[in-house]
Amino acid sequence: MADGSEAVARYSAQQLQDFIQRALSTVGMPDDNAAAIAALMAEADLNGADGHGIFRLPGYVKRMKLGGLNLTPNIRIEREKPGMALVDGDNAQGHLVMKYCAEIAIEKARTTGVAWVGSHHSNHAGPASLYAKMPLAHDMIGLYVAIGNANHLPPWGGMEMLLSTNPIAIAVPADQEPDVVLDMATTVAAYGKVKTAAQRGEQMPEGWMIDRQGKPLTDPNKANEGFLLPIGGPKGYGLALMFGLLAGTLNGAAFGKDVVDFNADFETVTNTGQFIVAVDISAFGDVAGFKRQVDAVIRQMKGSPTLPGFDEVLLPGEQSHRKRQDRETNGIPMHTGLLDALAALADELGIEKLS
Amino acid sequence: MADGSEAVARYSAQQLQDFIQRALSTVGMPDDNAAAIAALMAEADLNGADGHGIFRLPGYVKRMKLGGLNLTPNIRIEREKPGMALVDGDNAQGHLVMKYCAEIAIEKARTTGVAWVGSHHSNHAGPASLYAKMPLAHDMIGLYVAIGNANHLPPWGGMEMLLSTNPIAIAVPADQEPDVVLDMATTVAAYGKVKTAAQRGEQMPEGWMIDRQGKPLTDPNKANEGFLLPIGGPKGYGLALMFGLLAGTLNGAAFGKDVVDFNADFETVTNTGQFIVAVDISAFGDVAGFKRQVDAVIRQMKGSPTLPGFDEVLLPGEQSHRKRQDRETNGIPMHTGLLDALAALADELGIEKLS
């Protein structure tokens, strides 16, 4: 596999989880919270979300050490009605806030059929799909939208970076086939892909970014001279904006100029907003019948003849599913750069290295 | 204005509405249903949705005359819980079904904060924004997703047209500024734009369509030799697929191979699926404060310096808002081709022409 061939070693999800937990505990995170975050971060790596799992640990720890994050939060429902809740994350790590929100959404949806739970004063929570998938085990569909933690694109036609890649994830359970799980930024490329290209000394294809003249920008080392491009031009801009209004403004969370760049500022409270929707399939009809119908849709898509240059049709989440199968058996491939960063973190914190 | 300069005459929304109502009554639609549909269709034209208002009347009438639509439906709630309902549209005109669904969603959201209402056995309902905007008058946010009524794109990398342009609309109320209303297909170009280019003898830009070799297709007269392209490639495919599962499969409505091409087949029941979500802003916080915050976001976006080639930053729905202001004062511009089609329809039905 592509990700395996470049990696120097593989580690089990448990090894990653243990290391993350050691690191978080050392900076003062209570054990139960450290365990919950570590489990979700390792889960992200298991699912193939390499840019959103243990890769983020040094940044998270830096914020915790500099006081930008509340290690002993009181995450709580601030307002609620039968089909919704607004959660005050109390500046907790986003994983804790969104796990709490997902549990409330699932519980409420049992009664109301559909429930929507938003957050403010949350923080970065890793990959969107982690939370969209939480309702699946309860025979529910999940939707999740987040405000990205750094603005990388202007409104369409503009030059001021007022919007983030505001991602959406939607997870729908199947029967025999893998669940269908979309997890996408509203930009053509996520910013992490730009950073990866720079690390590898590669050029970016046209269409990822433009410069301040509106011309294609293909040198990732000049990324700070340009902007990410939204999918479908004004359409992706429209989605990023509406998701911002729903996940940010509606929840009393930061959006637009108020978004704190969490890669540059580790002390200011980010007031991150997210929301999750749980849809109880049994409210709409027979669950088993629905899942079989999802299987039928999946098989229709995969049965399509392919265009020249394509070996097969993939469903959203299918690549992640394959990576997970590989990683559960063979471990999670880790690159030298990441291992070096984690070794440096271990030294800094005086904890046992990843092993 | 661009749309005015090409038009040969302007008519008031009331004139359009009266003509539509005459036509629908003549083919056997009960008066109250004909009035409701005519009002929504004229509203679409007033909002600038030229491809989704009176333009559709000849097609709708053809379906009604050939028995593909139920003129005297019993639209009803089939299943419900406090925060959701599944509506059986009984093969009614989609406008009637979605008006009914929106009213239920709004009513339920008053109690639960958020409500989601899906439909099956509905039909084409005009522009998505019509329904997403209905909650606005109740200080609610609206979301609407529909299965398109003809498949125009394959899954990403495939060649079999199994997906439609499955649109989404999201409407958020502002205070002093125009409401923010996104209404977009998940393809780069809606199929109507391809048909318009063909009518005008224009070439399409690269990026709208590809042929069966995967190469750009720019001759709109060869549209049936290729496919529409989704926004952001696999991302737009992913959105179209997930929206199809949510608006179609979850509701027991047609999706994938089951979608009936309503431009080619006027007799088969389409079993169209849609859903609408109403989000009560007062459940999340102070409504007036929220709207002022939306104004602030709008002004941030519009205050951005522009890229070369752009005069201003536009918000989703802003062009529609401007068209509406113009059309309320000066009437709705109508082109010769459309006027000819409506005159022919009047002759066919033996009704008074548009005047």
Image (cartoon, coloured by chain):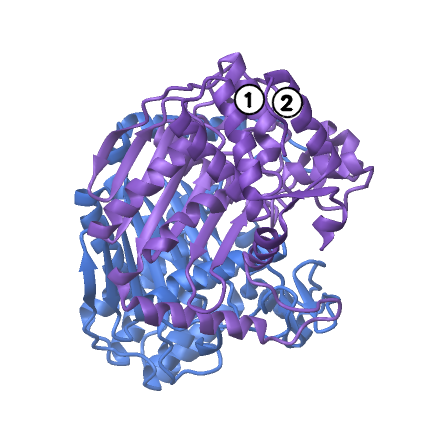
Chain colours: A purple, B blue
Q: Is residue A116 depicted above or below B87 in this figure?
A: above
Point out residue A78 in the picture as x, y percentages from the top left corner: 26, 28
Residue B162, image x, y percentages: 53, 72
Where on the picture, by quarter, is residue B181?
top left
Tell me the quadrant of the picture where the C terminus of chain A can be found: top right
Quadrant of the frame with the N terminus of chain A: bottom right
Evaluate if marks 2 and 1 touch, with contact meaning CB atoms under 8 Å apart: yes
Name above or below for residue A138 compared with residue B317: below
The residue tagged with tag 2: helix, strand or loop?
helix
Q: How many marks?
A: 2
Q: Nearer the viewer, residue B354 or B269?
A: B269
Chain that bears disc 2: A
Q: Secondary structure at mark 1?
A: helix
Res A156 visible: yes
In which quadrant of the rendered view does residue A305 lie? bottom right
- Residue B148 or residue B36, whichever sits in front: B148
Give the left or right position of residue B142, taking residue A194 as reference.
left
Left or right: A291 as drawn, with respect to B89 = right
Residues marked 2 and 1, same chain: yes
> Three-letter amino acid code at disc 1?
Val
Residue under label 1, please give it. Answer: A61
Task: Examine the rendered structure and indicate whether residue B116 appears above or below residue A309.
Answer: above
Give how far across and how far down residue A144 sits, in percent.
43, 44
Real-space Cα separation, disc 2 to disc 1, in angstroms:
9 Å
What residue sits right under mark 2 in the picture? A345
Residue at 39% x, 52% y is B129
